[in-house]
Each structure stands twice: as C-alpha cells, then as structure tokens.
Amino acid sequence: MLRSADSFYRRGSKLLVVAKFIPGINTMAPPLAGSMQMRFLSFLQLDLIGAALYIGLYFGIGFFFSDALHAVTQGYRAFGRLMGGVGIVLIGVYFGVRFWLLIKEKAQPPVVYAFPLEVAETSLAGAQIYDVRSHGYFDANAVRIKGSKRLDPHALNQSTPDFTTQQPVYLYCTCVREATSRRVARELEIKLKEAGVRIAVIKGGLSAWRKAGLPTEVVPRDDVTALPLFG
C-alpha cells in the first residue's frame, strides 16, 4: 500500500489516465486519490480523459479490424454451435444410459422388501440380519444394526454363511435404492435356490433403520478392517 501510494503521489496524473488499462491500479486509484486529498475537479478531469482513451481505443480496434473480428466471431459462433451439439449428444447419451439401466433393472428378478419395524419384530424371533455394505467397515466408529453380522458382498463366491431355513434372512446397505442389497439378494437366491432360504432387503437400509429409532451398535473391533497409515 505504501509503495502504491508513493507511486501514485509521484505519477498521479499519468496513472489516472492509464489506470483503466492496468488491472488492480484501476481499483486502487480512486480511493488513493481520495485518501491523498487530490482535488475533485482534477480527479474528475483525469478520470474522464482515461475513460475516453479506454473507450476510444477499443472502439478504434473494433472499427479498423471489423473484418478480422467478424471472422473471429463467426468462428466463435461455429464453435458454440459445435459445443452445443456435443452437449445435446452427451445429455442424450446420459438419459439413454439411465433408461438402459432402468430396463435392465426391470428385467432382473424382483426382490422382496421388508420395512425396518417389520424386521425388528421378526428379529426377536430369530431372524438373521446381514450387513452387506461394500464399505463402512474401515472406520473404528462405524455403526451397524444391533445384532447384525457382516457379509462381504465381494466374497459371495468364496463362502456363504450357514443360513437357517426356518427364519428369513434380511440384507441391508447404505446405497441409493438399496443397490448392493438387491444385487446380493439376487445372487444368494440363485446360489441357495435349492435350500429354500427366504431373503428380503430392508427398505431404506441403515438410514431408514436409524430414522425409525431402532437399536444400532458400534461395529466390533474384530470386524473393522484396518487400513495402512502413512507415518
């Protein structure tokens, strides 16, 4: 600020004339002029000269180079139309993929849903609840439905818990529209088709369970996957 004030004091008239062409100086010049008690008429005169020079220069450039500018603007317009077309295509691809995923989902076998309160009632009778989140077991403070067990959705081909056929098996996750729970439910139904195990997905997952005020617990330390730490 002191260097700017000293420069403005020594070159005030010149700086005001060219201030509009210099980023930063244009913003600082008026308050510096006021704080250093420059006469208002002097400031107004120099500022008007600078504004006229600024406007005149760009007006002159536009006038003398109008043909070149016209070509440039035409190029910008063509580029804008091209990018607009690309944007429309990308939007169409996005909705096309979403529609394809919807059709694909509709073609999948339906899954059975169960609401948290219903699950809580049946769990008292011995129903089995499994946490199939693909994540959430890396945080020491992670919580899960009280009494539930861990079922790694990526290791279904390696091992499957010994489900009992007398009580239903409930799955839950934290994905949008219970995506992981639905996938695991379909895979288990195929794998345990002959066993007669009843499998259902908890509607709304862990968040719906907690909103219903149902009990949760901290994930046991033995179930937490320790990540490597730097330092």
Image: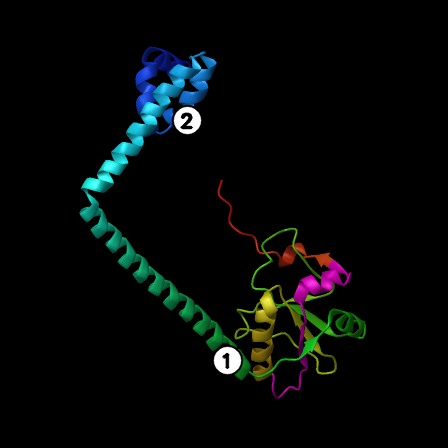
Q: Earlier in the sequence, mark 1 or mark 2?
A: 2
Residue segment shown in magenta: 192-216
- Find disc 1 in the rendering and name its residue: 103
- Find disc 2 in the rendering and name its residue: 27
The residue located at (62%, 80%) in the rendering is: 111
Mark 1 vs mark 2, CA separation in Å: 58 Å
User: x and y percent of residue 34 in the render?
Assistant: 46, 16
The residue located at (60%, 71%) in the rendering is: 181
Q: Is residue 48 left or right of residue 57?
A: right
Estimate how packed mark 2 is, as few (under 14), some (14 to 19) or many (20 or more) residues with alpha carbons within 10 Å. few
Secondary structure state at the residue bearing disc 1: helix
Disc number for residue 210: none
Amino acid type, label 2: Thr
Residue 124 against residue 75 in the figure, above or below = below
Residue 222 is at least partly visible in this image? yes
Whether residue 208 is in magenta: the answer is: yes
